Amino acid sequence: MLDPSNVRRAAVEDAALAEPRLRDLLRANAAIVERLDLEIVLRRIVEAAMRLVGAPFGALGVLAPDGTLERFIHVGVDDVTARKIGRLPTGKGLLGAVITDAAPIRVRHLAEDPRSAGFPAHHPPMDAFLGVPLRVGDDVYGNLYLTSGQRGPFSAEDEELVLALAATAGIAIENARLYDLARTREIWSVTTADVMAAMLEVSGEDVLSVITERVGALLEVDLVVVVVPHGVEDFRVTTVHGVSAGPLLGRVFPAAGTLAARALATQGAASLPCDADREPVGWHVSGPTVAIPLYSGGEPLGVLTMARRTGASSFTEAELGMASAFADQASVAIEIVRAREDRRRLETSRDRSRIARDLHDHVIQRLFGAGLSLQALSTAADGETSAALNTQVDAIDAAIKDIRTVVFALGAGERGTEKLTRDRLLDVVSEGSAGLSSTPRITFSGPLDSLVPSSLADELVAVLRECLTNIVRHADAHLVEVAAEITLDAITLTVTDDGCGMTGAVRMSGLANITERAVLLGGECTITSDGLSGTRIEWSVPVARGDESGGQ
């Protein structure tokens, strides 16, 4: 029969032993709930569990959606040893058993358990093992792992204490996650507002640069890259910001199978964890990466790719949702910027059209009337006066031709992508002026756009380009004049310069092809140069009536 006094004495001793451990549990609970930063909370959970059961080593593994370990927070192994060990555990052996069973596992000796996968080189010795799942609500968030080293196996009481701590840890993790989510939403909201405000103050071509710079500055990412479709099967990097960004600018890479291609195909954010080898990105990426498609209406503008540093936390589902919402708002802002640019171009085009009409309807008509008046006066004047008046009439005619050229150039802005013969000749003059001291002067006479067929317009463009190229290379000219004149049966292109003239060798090597072009078209090319005071090239070919008009 038991002695009642002995029973009471044992109960008192058990209570005395349990009381310090209960106080330790309360202190551990307080330590993990007093902070809201998730990273700090996770580490404090491990440290509190180690103190509670006297374990020299502890770790917390966060589960990925596929059931493997996404993150592994360890305490007790110094940084030097951790670097020697190398790759962190991914959930094999006993660690994987805790994941699979979602229940506590307590082992007296690791080496004797058949589920143990052993230790890699440089790993410190560990003997007893205790693994406990951490639940957040009804889901297993991760697992808490403890090893006792040389202190002996864990007891059933140790397991109960760690389970009690794990219950509090689940609440602390949920609070920290909610706090992190709120803080992340705030950061994304600030980023979105800042980017949208900045985008509305820039021109259309700078929109993607603004997005890249602002996102990189406000979010915790190391590299921001914008890629755009290049041809049918490639992407091209157009904008970069962040670490090692310089070499990426302008890179072209195949689109097939890349993260950016997946984002465009799904029209939503696509992400990769730290190990990005499973899916190409287009450049070397070792940290978590997310790709966000940018659209303007139904047109894909490109893909915004953001990468974090190696070892950083992966992008959560909440972050991917916020990234998609950001992309939607950015697309709306891009539409607004484009509409504003279109309106500005329309207003500019209207101004140019109004100026062109005023020049044509008023200035040219007044000059034409003045020329007619002078011409009438010249018939009644004496010889010298008549000659002087005719000279002024010629000057007025030349001015009218110049104004008509300006009128046509002003009107070219409102024709969009349509290229008429005069447009193409103006483009060649603009290109050729880069190597000259002054822009060549060009005049037009006659309905070039109505009578010159597209095939002949190609020849005119080629001849003019050849002439200007030779002037830039050999003539050392200051003034260059170009005249394109069409009559009912012929088109004549005249190019003159005030350069150093030509030698026979230059004429044969540089301009023989334009002479051959004229002959093949049934025309002729006359080159006049005295080798001292410039060169005049007159290229004339017949125009067949009834051909299709160039650019019409």
Image (cartoon, rainbow, N blue to C red):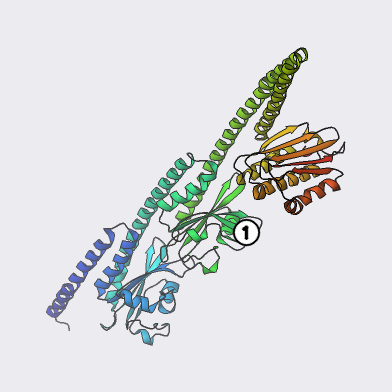
Q: Is residue 187 left or right of residue 531?
A: left
Type of amino acid at the residue the image marks with label 1: Asp
Residue 341 to residue 100: above or below = above
Residue 1 to residue 427: above or below = below
Query: Which residue position is annotated with label 1?
Result: 234
Q: Horizontal and vertical percent for residue 129? A: 34, 79
Q: Quadrant of the C terminus?
A: top right
> Which residue is located at x 54 percent, y 38 percent?
336
User: Which type of secondary structure does the marked residue at label 1 adopt?
Assistant: strand
Q: Which residue is most to the top?
A: 380
| Quarter of image, res 411 | top right
> Which residue is located at x 41 percent, y 78 percent?
94
Q: Horizontal and vertical percent for residue 288? A: 46, 62
Check disc 1: other Cα within 10 Å, few if <14, some if 14-19, many if 20+: some
Q: Which residue is most to the bottom?
A: 112
Q: Is residue 412 left or right of residue 80?
A: right
Q: Horizontal and vertical percent for residue 148? A: 29, 79
| Quarter of image, res 308 | bottom left
Tell which of 349 and 54 is nearer to you. Answer: 349
> Which residue is located at x 21 percent, y 71 percent?
21
Evaluate whether residue 20 shows in this view. Answer: yes
